[in-house]
Image: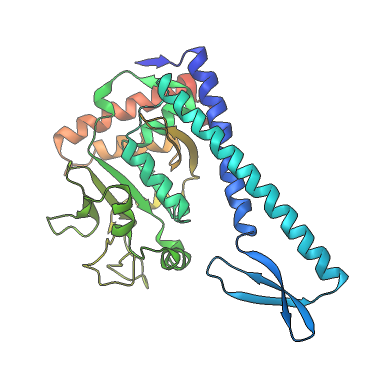
């Protein structure tokens, strides 16, 4: 049922994962020193000014020993962080080539690119990958490959949106250059468009790959439907409410670095494997479930339950 990564593959994944996570930390640190500082002369006085990425200016104060020290610390830290990020970026690029050469990854390139676009725009914390694509995270965490290829074959990825965090989500969305989720998806693949069936919760590309956005059913006081952007609900995606999503949302998220066929890496937030297989068993028991999907649900649930038992004991029931 499973094939373990060999020693070279395992060592490469561990090293690549460490480099990727260190680069992610460096990128976060770089946000603290975005923009710059400089001395601005106004009349007979000099003032310390701080600029952001939009070139907006804030005056910190006149030239004093204290402000000179602030300036020196800022410039030193900025140079150190930018150099570290540059070095780590080159290291990660080398690891991506090694990942491809050693066939470390097999997650679809498109999904890894999607995760990275969301991360770059500070939107990834508001989503959890559920469904079939979670299996790539479990494989990575366990250091194995699922040999049943049919268990991984799908043409859609399910993204669970955390509606309870919608206020901060909209703040971050408005900070993006694109302003809409469909525009972000088109940075991954320009052929993405809203589903032609009229389903506002999904987008599909010209290869029939679909990204579906779902959420828990609306509670009292929550808007419905709710679009990802301030545009009309027909101009952008609007996640659909699905029953029993509350249990998946309340589960502690599992975050794992997954590797694409290309060697590119991304952080995938998903549900823990024990929550996954319990949910899949539940789905398979629903009377209105498509019979073909029911069989697939049971197969995936059994695979992940076995994986937990053999390779991920930390997720075994206490």
From this view, report whether residue 2 is shown above or below residue 177. Answer: above
Image quarter of the N terminus: top left
From this view, report whether residue 264 is shown above or below residue 127. Answer: above
Q: Residue 136 location, x and y as percent? A: 38, 31
Q: Residue at x 32, y 52 (%)?
A: 187
State the residue in front, 148 or 21. Answer: 21
State the residue in front, 245 or 270. Answer: 270
Q: Residue 303 location, x and y as percent? A: 34, 24
Q: Residue at x 82, y 67 (%)?
A: 68
Q: Residue 118 location, x and y as percent? A: 42, 51
Q: Residue at x 36, y 70 (%)?
A: 222
Q: Residue furthest bottom?
A: 43
Q: Residue furthest left?
A: 197
| Left or right of 140 on screen, residue 180 | left
Q: Quadrant of residue 155?
A: top left
Is residue 146 visible in the rendered structure shown here? yes
Q: Residue furthest right?
A: 65
* Count of marks overlaid on the render: 0
| Left or right of 114 on screen, residue 141 | right
Q: Quadrant of residue 230?
A: bottom left
Q: Residue at x 78, y 60 (%)?
A: 72
Q: Residue 61 location, x and y as percent? A: 77, 77
Q: Quadrant of residue 162?
A: bottom left
State the residue in front, 98 or 214. Answer: 98
State the residue in front, 287 or 236. Answer: 236
Image quarter of the C terminus: top right
Is residue 248 visible in the rendered structure shown here? no
Coloring applied to the structure: rainbow
From this view, report whether residue 128 is shown above or below residue 259. Answer: below
| Left or right of 161 on screen, residue 12 | right
């Amino acid at each position: 049922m499973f094939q373990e990564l060999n020693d070279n593959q395992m060592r490469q994944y561990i090293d690549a994962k460490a480099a990727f996570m260190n680069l992610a930390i460096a990128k976060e640190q770089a946000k603290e020193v975005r923009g710059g500082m400089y001395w601005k002369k106004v009349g007979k006085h000099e003032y310390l000014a701080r600029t952001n990425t939009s070139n907006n200016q804030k005056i910190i104060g006149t030239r004093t020993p204290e402000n000179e020290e602030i300036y020196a610390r800022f410039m030193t830290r900025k140079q150190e962080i930018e150099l570290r990020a540059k070095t780590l970026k080159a290291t990660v690029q080398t690891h991506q080539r090694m990942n491809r050469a050693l066939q470390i990854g097999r997650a679809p390139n498109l999904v890894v690119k999607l995760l990275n676009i969301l991360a770059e725009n500070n939107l990834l914390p508001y989503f959890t990958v559920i469904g079939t694509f979670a299996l790539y995270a479990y494989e990575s965490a366990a250091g194995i490959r699922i040999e049943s290829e049919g268990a991984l074959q799908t043409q859609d990825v399910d993204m669970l949106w955390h509606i309870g965090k919608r206020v901060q989500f909209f703040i971050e969305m408005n900070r993006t250059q694109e302003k809409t989720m469909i525009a972000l998806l088109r940075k991954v693949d320009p052929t993405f468009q809203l589903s032609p069936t009229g389903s506002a919760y999904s987008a599909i590309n010209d290869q029939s790959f679909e990204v579906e956005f779902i959420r828990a059913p609306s509670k009292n006081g929550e808007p419905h439907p709710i679009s990802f952007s301030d545009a009309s609900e027909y101009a952008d995606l609007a996640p659909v409410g699905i029953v029993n999503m509350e249990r998946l949302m309340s589960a502690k998220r599992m975050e794992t670095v997954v590797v694409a066929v290309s060697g590119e890496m991304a952080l995938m937030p998903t549900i823990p494997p024990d929550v996954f297989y319990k949910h899949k068993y539940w789905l398979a028991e629903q009377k209105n479930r498509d019979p073909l999907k029911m069989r697939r649900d049971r197969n995936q649930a059994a695979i992940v339950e076995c994986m937990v038992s053999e390779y991920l004991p930390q997720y075994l029931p206490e």
